[in-house]
Image (tube, grey):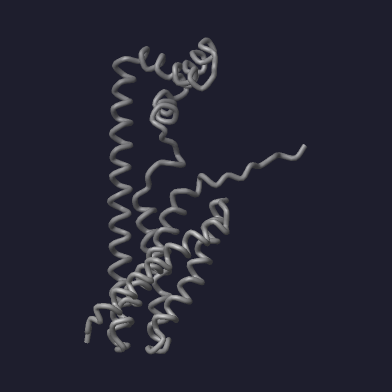
Amino acid sequence: MKHHLEKHYVNRIGWLRAAVLGANDGLLSTTSIVIGVAAASSDRHSIVLTALAGTIAGAMSMAAGEYVSVSSQADTENADLEREKKELEEMPEFELQELAKIYVKRGVSKQTALQVAIELSEHNALEAHAKDELGINEITTAKPFQASISSFFSFLAGASLPLIISVIAPVSNMVYWQYSFSIIFLMILGAISAKTGGASIWKAMIRICFWGTIAMGITALIGHLFGVNVN
């Protein structure tokens, strides 16, 4: 009999979230900034400098923000685990009954739930409470450094497109070049992220194109209306 290997996507959620968010943000935010400046100025030097500054600042900000955010989550998880560990030492019987009640709520009989709670507690009480009471496991555990690195390099990857376009595209049609290529790559990113996460590809593509168009359209409108001279 062949072994049935189930394919799950939830174990990818940590790095996938950071990578997709970073790439989308790098592409969309940098393109929006460049479009806003290009709509107000015909100076290539200013446009390229804006794209470069947006790329560097955005990547650093994304990495730092992701690290701080995920670190806060990790601190909260560790604090909960320490509290749970102390409660297991001080009142193990109460914690055992609490664990059994969780299984009862899931549809297990009281007798079976208590037996499961006893066996899991004998194996690793803290692990059992972490998973079933706190919802913390090896898949959802916060990994600040991994999230930070993923965000940094994915932002750079996404921002590299508008940076390259700002160098090679005709200045007179810069806004249209930036928008066209960004929409194409946003669709590709949406499809890749949906495929990797096992979600609907078309839904992801439509969603990211819709909001991407709005973001770039607003910045272009602002640049055009104000006509800021950035020379």
Residue visible at 31% across and 88% down in the picture: 42
Q: Residue at x 45, y 73 (%)?
A: 182
Residue 55, horizontal then vertical, whole percent: 33, 72
Task: Work out whether residue 203 or residue 21 is closer to the camera in this orientation and state it.
Answer: 203
Q: Which quadrant: the N terminus?
A: top right
Residue 191 place in picture, x, y as percent: 55, 61
Q: Quick one: which residue is furthest to the right in this view?
A: 1
Residue that protrudes farthest toward the front in the picture = 225
The residue under the point 43% across, 58% down is 19
- In the picture shown, does residue 121 fall above or below 72? above
Of 163 and 222, the residue lying toward us: 222
Q: From the viewer's perspective, is residue 121 above or below residue 43?
A: above
> Viewed as shown, does residue 112 lie left or right of 46?
right
Percent x, y of residue 155: 38, 65
Q: Is residue 214 above or below residue 70?
A: below
Query: Which residue reaches farthest top?
Result: 111
Quadrant into which the C terminus falls: bottom left
Q: Residue at x 30, y 79 (%)?
A: 224
Q: Position of residue 116 (x, y in %)?
A: 51, 18
Closest to the observer: 1 or 111? 111
Tell me where residue 89 sits by quadrant.
top left
